[in-house]
Image (cartoon, helix red, strand yellow):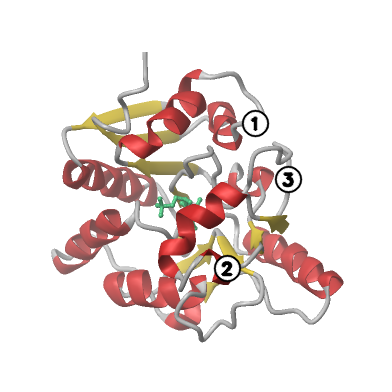
Amino acid sequence: MEVLIAQDPAEAAKRAADAVLDGLRRVDGHRLVLGLATGSSPLGLYAELAAAVARGDVDFSETLGFALDEYIGIAPDREQSYRQTLLNDVCKVIGLPEANLNVPDGMGAARAEIAAAAAAYDAKIAAVGGIDVQILGIGTNGHVGFNEPGSSLASRTRIMRLANQTREDNARFFAGIGHVPTHCVTQGLGTLREARRLVLIATGAAKAEAVAAAIEGPLTASCPASVLQLHPDVVICLDEAAASGLR
Ligand code: F6R
């Protein structure tokens, strides 16, 4: 595990983008497959990737994108859906075609339908040869993707009930906590661990406790991000505030 501590969020974003690009440079002989996180943390990283595209260092026009997660019950054309968020904040920014974006389906009529689509999502990732680089943020409760505390470290893409803390943290994207969905579909910890490289970015003091638990704490389902300790190629990019809980 490589832990990079930058002075500020802008520098952390640059280093995270470099880690993504390094991971993609190793790809030989197949289309690039990029795992995409939503949320505030990676926005600077995506801006840095856009700058790399503008410089001609990389081209995402043939790249396949796979989202980490999606809310259940938010139609894919609604602004708060992760599909729309990724189209606006990532696809348009880095030039990844909409047709190449894959997002878990949270709109099945019945639970069994959503669960079947989740299993098909894992199968699709496997069918394209796996994710080359997975971009991650971390929740204040230590979640990665929406794998909330208590998630099996071997879990697959599945339906998850969102923790109250997560719903509170994400209420800023909705007209109040009552509008935040209660459930989502998320890549499992076992799924996201199969990506060849993981790049996690975290900034700000609110993430310090979760970051310390993930990096220095025991491997435990109580801090799902601690599963990163098992991965052979993880780069964690922090600013000083997010790193302030490290010993
Ligand atoms: C997003 C995701 C979440 C976020 C995490 C941090 O697709 O899966 O794990 O990365 O909740 O969110 P922000 O970056 O908004 O603090």
Residue occupied by mark 3:
155
Which of disc 1 and disc 3 is earlier in sequence? 3
Percent coordinates x, y for residue 4 in the rendering: 29, 30
Front residue of 184 and 200: 184
Name the residue at 82% across, 75% down: 113
Residue 137 numbered mark, or none: none
Percent coordinates x, y for residue 127 in the rendering: 67, 63
Q: Nearer the viewer, mark 3 or mark 1?
A: 1
Mark 1 surroundings within 10 Å by alpha-carbon count, few (fewer than 14), some (14 through 19), many (20 or more): some
- Up the image or down, 28 lies above or below 86; here it is above
Image quadrant occupied by the N terminus? top left
Residue occupied by mark 1:
222
Image quadrant occupied by the C terminus? top left
Mark 3 surroundings within 10 Å by alpha-carbon count, few (fewer than 14), some (14 through 19), many (20 or more): some
In the visual, does 217 lie left or right of 122? left
Percent coordinates x, y for residue 102 in the rendering: 55, 72
Name the residue at 38% across, 52% down: 24
Q: Where on the picture, by quarter, is residue 205?
A: top left
Residue type highlighted by circle 2: Gly
**Mark pair 3, 2: CA separation:** 28 Å
